[in-house]
Image (tube, grey):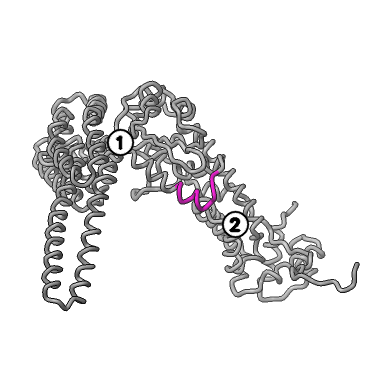
Amino acid sequence: MTLNIKERCQKVFQCISGKVEQSIRTIASITQIPKSSVGRHLRAIKRRQQYPESPFWETEAGREWLRRLVFAVIYEFGIKGGIGSDSLSSFFHRLRLKEQFGCSASALRTLEVRLREVILTYEQIQRSSCQGAQRIGICVGGDETFYDLPILVAIELASGFIFSEAICENRTYETWWQQVSEWFNPQQWDCRYFVSDEAKALVKLALSGLGCPSLPDVFHLLYALSKSMGSAIARNQAQLQKQQNALQQKLKATSSAEKVTEVEAQITALQAQQKTLETEHQEYQQSIHKLSQAIHPFHIETCEPQLGLELSETLKVPLATLERLSQSHAPQKGQDAIERWHKQIPDLSGTLHAWWQWTIQTLKAQTQDSDTQDWVLTVLLPWVYWHQQSQKTRQPQLKAGYLHASQKAEAALLKHPFTLSLQESQQQQWVDWAMWMCAKFQRTSSAVEGRNGYLSRLHHASRGFTEQSLKVLTIIHNFDLKREDGTTAAQRLFDKQFPDLFEWVVLNMGDLPRARRTLKPKMSRKPSIQLVPA
């Protein structure tokens, strides 16, 4: 039986780790290893055991833990964090591991390349298991980000699964469709709507390519108002505060009674302007919140279904307030942002209509009982939806409104006679379905914006992306990154378990590179002057 170097070292270490010191001949007889090899292994073990923790690395548990440590550092910090191999090599040297495995920068680069290849292999193996017998309903968001070249990103908004993330030279419809057609199969995917910033190429992609409605991104609409009016009001407030501070300093340095009266009058006028500006800022914030709270499938006050027909009337008051404020703070940009809102109101109504159509069709496939359908649509869904919104939202005022709506919907659910008639298992089954359905209401492509922010940091750290590195990051996003409930994007989309990506990588990476000692002497880099010519 032929033993590899790792097994030979373990056998020799087991023989010398006892209390009784044994000769080379005895160790060779026990391990069935030539005496010359035993002597070489003993010298290597002695060289490695320089520190108190060194004997642990010679054990099987120690070597396995060391493998996990090295692969985890390269995976988390090298690939996901964009930290270079030189820094990782310095880290391992500070842990006094240079005698345990090859931790030079070049060796770690080779390991990182190998790890990327294993991750790509993982994705190829899992791709076949992602093919299901039934069509999966999806809502997709698309956008592009710019570094060196545009990166086109298409994400399933409810699950966060990235369908397409590729570097392209342009962002025309043909380029978008070339990327999307690689994964879009009408027999597998039932695309219900496509959320974007309404760029012409993306609108055409939704209507002609995916065959679904193109819906406007509420995030971009709200951001346009914030960028124009919100920033203008904030700048004016800062300027008034700066002027007031300057007058306060001037007042302290003034001794003349006449000038004191003049400065105090100026301060009083600035305080009046500041108070007016604070009132206008509150009106601006309240109007923005009303716009955001209006675009939901349920009324936040009554929890009744909102089909989108009355959306134009609901948005009229906050838009009128914002139009009045824009005349004072952002005449041109503010008016353009408000005009964009007016143009998009029919499409925003289409957002609500598309989700309700999807919900009713899916519910009819679940049950034909009219009482159950009415209970789900009017009682269960409002509670689940507002509960999810209150969990996701961080803005204090919006969160308070969503919590109030959730509590009101919960009270109606608990006192409804149909709720009391269901068994606990049936209730949980419908709650799970309602959670899945409410997650499908997506009015923004903020998931794409968040992905762009993540890529921006890595692009800066890694000084660009290669096609392979971007592909690896996409696989990690889909199969490794987890939400608070512990699920990955692939699990949420396909509703099945996948092997843990990192554990699969550890099993398939093989052994660590051996530590090597160079025989070349270190050359001095100091300049020398030759007094005698060669």
What amino acid is found at the position of numbered circle 2 in the picture?
Ser
Magenta span main SS = helix
Disc number placed over residue 85 in the picture, else none: 2
Any magenta on residue 219? no
Q: Residue at x 41, y 47 (%)?
A: 453
Q: What segment is highlighted magenta in the picture?
A: 455-465
Q: Residue 215 appears at what percent x and percent y? A: 30, 30
Q: Is residue 47 above or below residue 409?
A: below
Few, some or many residues within 10 Å of mark 1 (<14, 14–19, 20+): many
The count of marks equals 2
Which quadrant of the figure has residue 487? top left
Few, some or many residues within 10 Å of mark 2 (<14, 14–19, 20+): many
Q: Residue at x 12, y 38 (%)?
A: 317
Q: Is residue 287 above or below residue 182?
A: below
Element under disc 2: helix
Q: Residue 57 appears at what percent x and percent y? A: 61, 65
Q: Is residue 422 visible?
A: no
Which quadrant of the figure has residue 409? top left
In this rendering, position of residue 297 left or right of residue 169: left
